[in-house]
Image (cartoon, rainbow, N blue to C red):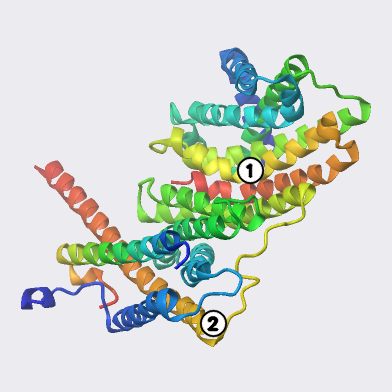
Amino acid sequence: MNSEAQAIKGVGTPATRMYGLMAIVALGWVLLGGLIFTPEDAVQGDAVRIMYVHVPTAWVAYLAFIVTGVASACWMIGKKHSLGFDRVAGASAEVGVVFMGMTLLSGSLWGRITWGTFWVWDPRLTTTAFMFVTYIGYLAVRGLGGTAQQRARRSSVIALLAVLEIPLVHFSVVMWRSLHQRATVLSPDGDIKMDGLMLFTLLFGVFGFSVLFAWLVSHRQRIMTMQDAQQTSALDAAVTERLKEAQV
Amino acid sequence: MNHAGFIIAVYGVTFGVIIGLAVYTMKQGRNLSRTVADKDKPWT
Amino acid sequence: MSMSVSRIARAVAAKDLRIELRSRVVSNQVLPFSGLVMIMFAFALDNDDVLQRVAGGLVWLATLFSLFILVQRTFAVETYDGALDSLRVAGVNPQGIFVGKSVALFVQLLALESVLFLSAIVLYRVNVDGSGLVLLVTCVLCASAGLAFVGTLYGGLTAGARGRETLLPLLLLPVVAPVLICATRATESALRSGGVTVGEGWPWVGVLAVFAAVFGLGGLLSFGSLIEE
């Protein structure tokens, strides 16, 4: 890195560099351990290897939406309506949408191997798909424009309405499915007998993906801070310009 | 490896997307830090 | 504020319904559109038995498609000449606006569903008897209330935004999915499609009532901050 680049203060800090390093180590292990070192499962065979990425991405996706909901509630409850909460909510939703997309994809490929179909109308899958679409909508609302406070107000309401919506969707899908058939789908990770290395790889993966989530959210939230600052200064410049015109 | 195509696809997409998102985030951060004043970076 | 929430609500609802009666957009465009959708379903499915079996689902699907149009309209009326802004600036209680617009939407939805169920009876050969009718009417009332509340809530959010025509269905469809599931099951019970009994339909109506209550309350609490700029 040249001296000019070092003079600019970037988004990285010692803390995020440490997260980043930890994430790289853990994800490197998931890649090697998951694909090569861990044994195959007695029932599932090699298909079990998908678990090492599917379960951690699903965990991060759900975690991200919990963080978005909590941060939105904090923005709303807080007397100062601090934009920091709003940016964390937004950054977390961005990361969550990406991870939920990956979860749905890896899950359907895993399902094709173990169940024989890409998709079953299981409540957990269906609710996950609805969460994915709901948070795509949430991000679209964030992109509506206006000031940062307007964005925060709209999107916090949408995030909290989503917290109402998701349980209702889940409950009605559970009721819908239980009417026609008892849940025939085995939970894909339920009947796997795990040895020590398999369990370690899975848990280390969950740890690594969580640290990656922290890294992504802190970076993306700082990027949003800069974008907001840029928007504010552009607005200020336009106002100053108009004032000058008026004085001439 | 049984189902190698599916398994490689899952790993490829997952790690590809993660690396892509991380690189995009770092690039975006670097470009913005050049244009934004240090006073608007409360974490520094 | 001197005006109570219920007085504002009544005034807003009366204004919206009067506009719809005079402009005749709902009666001359939205209702014919929904009838046309019912005919199109018959073309797509092309089997009398299948149509009779899935009639409930088709009615509610057609309701959702028409709901988007109704919601767009009820807020287009407000944003054309900045009417919503004037109400806000005048300090009119947003809860009153929310209830008023929901009531107007509710009435329009009831008109829409009457047309849809009539066309189902005529086109899809479904039958409904006494006890089925009680279930059906309760289901329609609860489902319409829920749809009116979420429609007003999300319509208010997207009112005046760029690209609202496409954003509204994206936001609204996932939210109303429980209504589609529950109202369809309850309607199938009321029409006894596929051998289900009327008694099996009532728990679904219960979920519809919960849905309406949750989003009615959510709307009362949040509508003010959604339309505030």
Q: What amino acid is at disc 1? A: Ala
Q: What amino acid is at disc 2? A: Leu
The residue at which mark 2 appears reads as A199
Instruction: Please report the residue visible at 54 percent of the width from the left and 87 percent of the height from the top.
Output: A196
Image coords of residue A14 (percent x, y): 28, 84
* Picture layout, residue C94 above or below residue B26: above
Image coords of residue C176 (percent x, y): 63, 42
Q: Quadrant of the C terminus of chain A?
A: top left
Residue C162: give its label: none
Image coords of residue A178 (percent x, y): 77, 52
Tag count: 2
- Chain hosting mark 2: A
Mark 2 Cα shell of 10 Å, populated few (<14), some (14-19), many (≥20)? some
- Which element type, helix, strand or loop, lies under badge 2? helix
Hey, which residue is sitting farthest bottom in the picture? Answer: A196
Instruction: Please report the residue visible at 42 percent of the width from the left and 62 percent of the height from the top.
Output: B10
- The image quarter containing residue A171 is bottom right
Instruction: Please report the residue visible at 72 percent of the width from the left and 26 percent of the height from the top.
Output: C50
| Residue C187 appears left or right of B5 | right
Mark 1 Cα shell of 10 Å, populated few (<14), some (14-19), many (≥20)? some
The residue at which mark 1 appears reads as C177
| Residue A194 appears left or right of A204 | right
What's the CA distance linking mark 2 and mark 1?
37 Å
- Chain hosting mark 1: C
Instruction: Please report the residue visible at 61 percent of the width from the left and 65 percent of the height from the top.
Output: A188
- The image quarter containing residue C26 is top right
* Picture layout, residue C151 above or below residue A178: above
Mark 2 vs mark 1: in front = 2
Hey, which residue is sitting farthest front in the picture? Answer: B1
